[in-house]
Image (cartoon, helix red, strand yellow):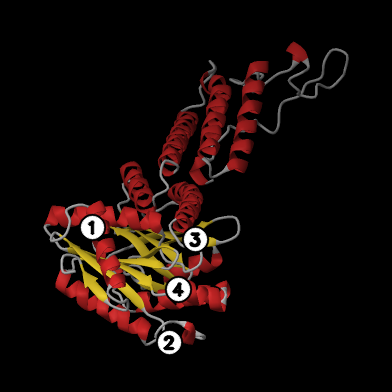
Amino acid sequence: MGDLAYQTLQEPTSKRSRIGNDGARNTGSMYYGDDHELEPGMSPLSRWQVLFAAGGGLFVVVGWQLLPSPLAALLLALGGGFFGVALAPRLWRDGPSKGPADAERLEETITTFQEGMLDLYSLVELGRTISASLDLDQLFTTTMKRVADTTGVESYALFLHDETMDKLIARTVSGTGMEALQDRSFAIGEGLSGRVYQTRTPETHSAGGSLPWPDIPSHVRSVVALPLSSADRTLGVLLLYSPATGAFGERQTAYFTVLAKQLAIALENAQLFIKTRELSYRDALTGLFNRRYFEEALDREVRRAIRYNLPVALLIADIDHFKIYNDSQGHHQGDNVLKEVTTRLTENTRQVDIVARIGGEEFVVILPMTTKTHARLAAEKLRRSVEETKIPGEEVLPGGRLTISLGLAAYPEDASDPTGLVEAADAALYSAKRKGRNRTEMFGRS
């Protein structure tokens, strides 16, 4: 793994042999006792050195197999430590000096060992940071801040694969001149990120001028591109940038490659968590948010309205005479009506509005930053949309068509907390039912 692999001193391949008194030739093995002659300054390995070296090798092999988990980095660090303990006596044993070359080799070995230990320790700490969160934004922010503190690399772009669009989206960017990349999308195969996504192979590039890819800003002179790959798919690509030429060597690339493997596992876990949470917030039949999410969202929106002195409105809608239709046409057709009403509600509300099914044939719509007057206009739009929808068997309904009734309440006019807002809108809905259905009633005007 580049400079992360620790150097070991090589035993001389040729050893002097001599003829004993009995004429037998000494094979040069360290197991032949005191008659064996070694190079000046060299001595046999003791049993404990062999054990430490073997233990270090075992830790390295096991740790490498477990990458990119934090435990793997810890095992690699221990393996390196054991190798260091085994080699130390060989490096410092008394004996004739071979001069500056020997000292230079010793200093290089020690430096490489220290750098490798620091890299492995850093990866262990990063592993702890990465595994501590299942929130995507927090995961990216804390991880890359730790990377910047450790390596000095502050400019990066994280591209995630959007399965709906089948494109790479710049989810998170950081650094000088990176703002233009935020939320940009690239086709698979486009740019350096698109190519690395396809090949699943890390790439490092450096040039004296601008690099020839649209996902690399013009001031960047060095880049390392790392695929974020799980066992069966690629989740995205991480690009790290530097304005300096030749900023990413073999050691840095190896370090970031292991980091990318850790980040990919955490990313996959976070995405699975998000999907699971989404399912817990969704109504299985209609795909709308359920009561649990509605209650949390309404509490959040009312608190925001109070804090920033903003209006918020709530609509509660109920399908008129749904039981009659369901009993007459069957539950399967009744489910289709619920889905049709869902389509009408979602098509005629804004992206910021929150539509949920809270039970049976009852729906709610939260309208953030909407006054009571404007909320009534929105409610009437929904009511007319459902009324104009043609469904099979609607002739069994009173009036011969599908309709809904709506109750409307708003903050701050009708209530000062979520519970009061729901009670006010529910009371307005009851008034709409009592007055003949297929109408919108505002709380306080019934």
Percent coordinates x, y for residue 36 in the rendering = 74, 17
Tag 3's secondary structure? strand
| Separation of residues labelled 1 and 2 (CA atoms) | 33 Å
What number is the disc on residue 421?
A: 1
User: Quick one: label 2, few (<14), some, or many (20+) residues within 10 Å?
Assistant: few
Position of residue 327 relative to residue 290, above or below, is below
Q: Of tags 1 and 3, which is closer to the observer? A: 1
Please, what is the three-letter code of the amino acid marked with disc 3? Leu
Mark 2, secondary structure of its residue: loop
Q: CA distance from mark 3 to mark 2?
A: 52 Å
User: Disc 1 residue type?
Assistant: Leu
As measured in the structure, the alpha-carbon distance from the residue carrying label 1 to the one carrying label 3 is 42 Å
Q: Earlier in the sequence, mark 1 or mark 3?
A: 3
Look at 34% across and 67% down and name the residue there: 216
The kind of residue on which mark 2 rests is: Gly
Q: How many neighbours does mark 4 have within 10 angstroms: few (below 14), some (14-19), or many (20 or more)?
A: some
